[in-house]
Amino acid sequence: MVQFVSVENILKTVRTCGVETFLAGLANYVEQDFRRWELFDKTPRVASHSKIGVIELMPTSDGELYSFKYVNGHPANTKLGLQTVTAFGMLSKVESGYPFFLSEMTVLTALRTAATSAVAARHLAPKPSETMAIIGNGAQSEFQALAFKALLGTKTLRLYDLDPEATQKCMRNLAPYGLELIPCKSAEEAVEGADIITTVTADKQYATILTDNMIGAGVHINAIGGDCPGKTELHKDILLRSKIFVEYPPQTRIEGEIQQLPEDYPVNELWRVISGMEVGRAHANDITLFDSVGFATEDFSALRFLHDTVQKTGDYEDVDMIAEPTDPRNLFGLLTQDDSRDKAA
């Protein structure tokens, strides 16, 4: 049997834990696995691109467990009443190859993306970081806001989206969580006085959400939206002024903001900062940039955390996914047994 977490199951679990508590716990697992970075198999995600989106597989293993995630990214889906991103993932035991845990990952990916952003900011952002601008108030914005509140104590959000209804939606959803919410009329207005700037737009194109003149000394930029070839959010000059941190350089050079830079342009690996091998923010005036595209180890962490959590909440179902004949060499015998039972009936 394989434990299966449905959408209903994960919603029950998050509600039981509380979203901020869940995000904090997930962030701890993400950070733990970054500290074990050298144990993992690492490869850029396997992507199938089309003119309207992308479908990807994201595998990794720490030598004991193996995970993969199936995920798509289709920005035009919202016009059809569909999600931009959908996903599911699985954990297996390396020793036997048997899968033991299967979960929806549309909701879980949103949670792990926010948790990873907050983990990076905990090591890179100025202290304190009480004010954050969020540019792009779509599906990911509330998750980002609550992760930063839970991990960094962020108190004020300055919100901007090309679609004012998206900002209003974000404000309605965040109203119960005790944050000061300030709707802004432009990206320029949103970044005023912000310690952290999060960009999380969805259009699959080279875009300039932030221009160089908008970024002052000492700011931390959490750039999430640039996550596939041909899709960026920041002007190149911002990158040249920033200390850039990435998850896995071979993947980020293809998909992240740094696809705008030469292939040999120096960047810093986040795991080395988290492990204490390198310094993140060295000076108060540093501009730090987390060029986040999402990596398979984060999905591994999310699945591992969810598995451990639902053992306590019981929010899963057993699914019969693995054929197990009495004699493992006689798989065909299962067909004969079924046939015999049918005749007997």
Image (cartoon, rainbow, N blue to C red):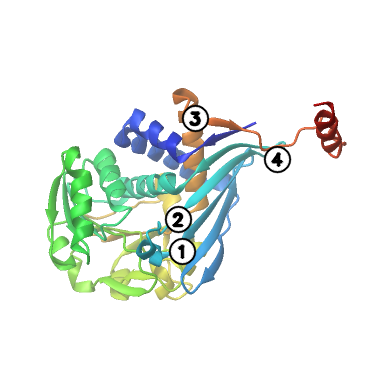
Amino acid type at image mark 4: Gly
Instruction: Tell me the mark number nearer the camera, choosing from 2 and 3.
Output: 3
**Residue annotated with mark 2:** 247
Q: Is residue 148 left or right of residue 111?
A: left
Instruction: Tell me the mark number nearer the camera, choosing from 2 and 4.
Output: 4
**Residue annotated with mark 4:** 97
Q: Residue at x 51, y 31 (%)?
A: 316
Mark 2 or mark 1: name the one nearer the start of the chain: 2
Q: Residue at x 67, y 39 (%)?
A: 94
Mark 2 or mark 4: name the one nearer the start of the chain: 4
Q: Is residue 123 left or right of residue 47?
A: left
Determine whether the residue tagged by mark 4 lies in a helix, strand or loop.
loop
Asked if labels 1 and 2 touch by Cβ distance under 8 angstroms, the answer is yes
Determine the image quadrant of residue 246: bottom left
The x and y percentages for residue 291 are 38, 61
- Separation (CA) of disc 2 from disc 3: 24 Å
- Separation (CA) of disc 1 from disc 4: 29 Å
- Separation (CA) of disc 2 from disc 4: 27 Å
Determine whether the residue tagged by mark 2 lies in a helix, strand or loop.
loop
**Residue annotated with mark 3:** 308
Amino acid type at image mark 2: Glu
- Separation (CA) of disc 4 from disc 3: 20 Å
Which numbered tag is attached to residue 252? 1
